[in-house]
Amino acid sequence: MADAGHRAGAIRHVEHVMGTVFSFDVRPPYGDGVRAALDEAVALLHRVDAVFSTYRADSAISRLGRGEVTVADCGAEVARVLARCARARRETGGWFSHTAAGRLDPSGLVKGWAVERASDLLHAAGARNCCVNGGGDLQLRGEAAQGVPWRVGVAHPLEPGALLTVVEGRDLAVATSGTAERGAHITDPHTGRPATALASVTVTGRRLARTDVLATALFAMGDGARERAASFDGHEVLAVTAAGAVWHTAGFPGAVAGGVSEVGVVRGGAVAARGAVVAGGW
Amino acid sequence: MRRAVSTAVLTTAGVVVLLSLKPHHSTVLLSVPPVPGASSPGRAAGPPRDGTFTGAAVRTPYGPVRVAAVVRGGRLVAVRVIQVPSGTGRDQQIAGYAVPRLAREAIGADSARIDAVSGASYTSQGYIDSLQSALDRADG
């Protein structure tokens, strides 16, 4: 119904960069400066890729990893990102690591950080309501339309094209880590082996860099993620196990209202009803 | 004992959810109160309250299934599975496939407006077939 109304006048842009696709969606009202800010944001993503890509032999990160240059040689931006990576590693007890298997790879933080910076550029230029989606990890500012929150579908990790749920919110970050597209590419930093217990982990928060890091760390934790999921202030977690079971933290936005808390599937459980529902069957 | 599902349930303009438990094609039908939207602007039935509406347990060949519908802002936003059969290998299949489908179809039936999609990183190639790609092509 409201699709046309909500999207009328939106600025959209799609950019292939960092081995994935970034989608920009700026909703009105916005000022004249927003289009220039969008160009700037796109240029930023390419610059970040040139500096931080582990796939480019000539990137600063690749050269740093080979020991050809020092952090000081690489400039303040690289130093800042590596410091954030080190902090993320501490905060997650090593479940996020930019040095797993002795190889320097800050990619797990860089993409979310780049999306956040792109979003900041747009916001500073007057795009109060915008969505930047970097390969499935999103930074949302403001709302979709006046009085209407953003609605983000969470892709089902085991059923291509299907949605697991819908997250609603304003000024929200949503990150999903999983095996769906790239196979088992997240390794358990403690063993060096691919993490396979979970099919996907979705985390919500305010800022994407940290939110994305937590999604990666929780995915690596596998079965252990469930008891750690509620311990990150300001973040909510939804996970699908490799067997297809679903669990989430009590405050996961859009998933829970009222009486049902904490779990998507409880075997033999019972929950107090807050209303009536008609059920047919036999 | 089998009780025929009343067709009246199907015509309440509420959200109807089918849960197929293969291979026997048993069907669980859940109907929640009508939700106002583009296709049903009338509010004669009254706006649905926000909250979680828990259904009665439904017997299936594998054991009882109980679900709850979550309504927020007058819209069905999720279906929670409260109880699924346990103790056999079959329940894994139900939890793994039928239950997510249940939630998906419920959300789909509400024609949920989606602005963007979060999912495990797609490659440039994978993007082409993604829901996000379809959204990006929508008229701005």
Image (cartoon, grey):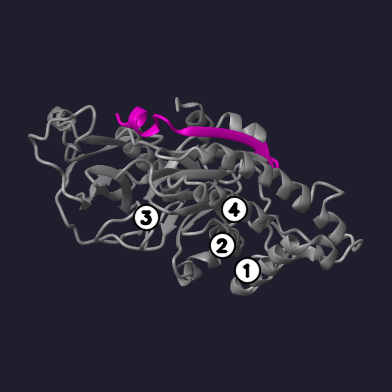
Q: CA distance from mark 4 to mark 2?
A: 13 Å
Name the spot of residue A109 as percent of width and height, x first: 65, 58
Instruction: Give the foreground label among 3 and 4.
Output: 4
Q: Which residue is mark 1?
A: A88
The amino acid type, in three-letter code, at marker 1 is Ala
Asked whether disc 1 touches disc 2, contact meaning CB atoms under 8 Å apart, the reply is: yes
Is B73 or B108 nearer to us in this picture? B73
Q: From the top left corner, tell me how far across and down residue B88 is, in percent.
A: 42, 53
Mark 2 or mark 3, which is nearer the start of the sequence?
Answer: 2
Name the residue that disc number 3 marks: A253
**Residue underneath mark 2:** A210
Residue B32 painted magenta: no
| Marks 4, 2 in one chain | yes
Q: Which residues are magenta?
A: A1-19
First of labels 1, 2 by sequence position: 1
Tell me which residue sits at (77%, 52%) in the image.
A51
Q: What's the distance in space between the residues labelled 3 and 1, CA to CA? A: 24 Å
